[in-house]
Amino acid sequence: MYLAVLQLAKATASQIARFSKINRATTYLYLRHLINRGLVSSFESMGRVFFVAESPERFIQLLDVRAQEISRQAEYFSKMLPELKSIFNLAKGKPQIRFFEGKEGLASIQQDILETQTQALHCFYCIDYVYEVFPNISKTYSSERVKRQIESKIIYTSRLGAKKFSDDEEKLRERRFVPFEKFPFSSDVTIYGNKVAIASLRGDLAGVIIENKQIADSLLLLFELAWEAAGKYNK
């Protein structure tokens, strides 16, 4: 648009629109923008408004002004940077929470557990409820866990009492039983890496993954406390 006005020397908006092949409404919009930038001026003659291009050196002046503004902004943000970084680091420390619904949602939680780079899982659950929701879990999730060489340490309960498992060593598992009447777990809790997954296995199936090192570390300590206490039921 500036080039069109420059080449026409002086022209009305209609003439500029025809010359630049831009519709009149857009031409007026662009001309107003150029006038605000000081690149085009206007004057009235015999009842008509004419537009004239200002010197191209005006572009250099505009760039100088922009450079000064950028310099001021850079100086301002340099002063603000320590405070902004402290807010950023605080936000990074906040737990990341994801919610899941239904059996497919719980399967997604299992997939996240498998794909998180961790060497061990620590779990609480009622084995009866796990098999009610995932009857083929041994052939699917457990087999994949073993393939990935992820060990599993489990505190479990069952309405049928303690069970004997002949394949725990092969499946990289270590378990301790607690009585169902005292510890009727209705959810599966798994601590892995910097994450904790909690999956409801009764009623409406739903789950949540909380990603936060402090929360995961604290629950891991609680697991170890419970593991030690569960020893009395496994003598």
Image (cartoon, rainbow, N blue to C red):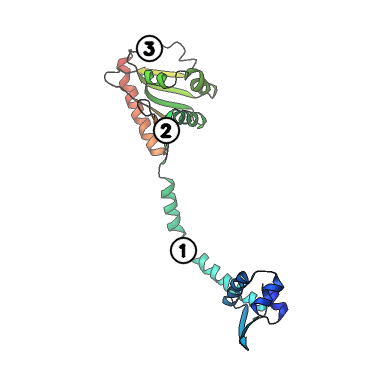
Tell me the kind of residue under disc 2.
Glu
Classify mark 3: helix, strand or loop.
Answer: loop
- Residue placed under numbered mark 2 in the picture: 101
Q: Residue at x 51, y 21 (%)?
A: 140
Which one is closest to the eye, mark 1 or mark 3?
Answer: 3
In the rendered view of the protein, which quadrant contains the C terminus? top left
Q: Position of residue 187 (x, y in %)?
A: 36, 26
Classify mark 1: helix, strand or loop.
Answer: helix
- Badge 2 crowding class, 10 Å Cα cut-off, few under 14, some 14 to 19, many 20 or more, is some
- Residue placed under numbered mark 1 in the picture: 79
Tell me the kind of residue under disc 1.
Lys
Q: Is residue 87 above or below residue 230?
A: below
How many numbered marks have been drawn onto this rendered protein structure?
3
Q: Position of residue 40 (x, y in %)?
A: 63, 79
The reply to whether the C-beta atoms of the residues labelled 1 and 3 are less than 8 Å apart is no
Q: Quadrant of residue 48?
A: bottom right
In the shown orientation, is residue 86 left or right of residue 61?
Answer: left
Q: How far apart are labels 1 and 3 at the CA level?
A: 64 Å
Q: Quadrant of residue 51?
A: bottom right
Which one is closest to the eye, mark 1 or mark 2?
Answer: 2
Residue toward you, 182 or 170: 182
In the rendered view of the protein, which quadrant contains the N terminus? bottom right
